[in-house]
Image: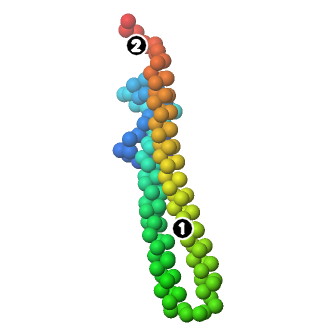
Amino acid sequence: MSGVGGVTVVGQPNDGWERLGVSAGHAGAAGGGGGAGDLLHSGGPWRRAAGGADQLVTLLGPVKGDLEAAHQGLIAGAGALSALAELSAVRASWERRIEEARAECGSLAGKLRAVARGQSQTNEAVKSDFDRVKTPNVSGAR
């Protein structure tokens, strides 16, 4: 987040920024620049974070199978070692953690996208409200 000339920017350039507050043309600043209190933000960071969470779900997908394959090879080589019971408990614990992480990442991705949608809907409602406000003609022309 950064401030530039009275405008607070959230997101990255070319990220589909939306302006909250009075539009540049109504801000009263010379040259049509934004006035104090304007906020530019983007849903891009939310969508990128959701994509990252989706990637984690995908990347964690084959881990359980890989763990199972490695465990099978270990059992074949271990024979009747007493540590096999502990090894099975550790494996089961890791399998639960992997599945919980996948579920959490999947849930998070949806929530992040919902934030971006919600912001966009709110922005449209605020813009619509501002557009309905009649502003007096201060230039003296009638």
54 w.r.t. 97: above or below: above
Please tell me whether mark 1 sits on a helix, a strand or a loop.
helix
Nearer-the-camera pick, 117 or 99: 99
The residue shown at (63%, 84%) is: 85
Nearer-the-camera pick, 95 or 44: 95
The residue wearing badge 1 is 98
In front: mark 2 or mark 1? 1
The residue wearing badge 2 is 139
Residue 29 placement (x, y as % from top left) = 43, 27
Nearer-the-camera pick, 36 or 97: 97
The residue shown at (54%, 65%) is: 99
Residue 97 placement: quadrant? bottom right
Residue 101 placement (x, y as % from top left) = 54, 63
Please tell me whether mark 2 sits on a helix, a strand or a loop.
loop
| Callouts 2 and 1 close, C-beta under 8 Å | no
Residue 54 in view in this figure: yes
Residue 9 in view in this figure: no
137 w.r.t. 25: above or below: above
10 w.r.t. 74: above or below: above
Residue type at mark 2: give it.
Ser
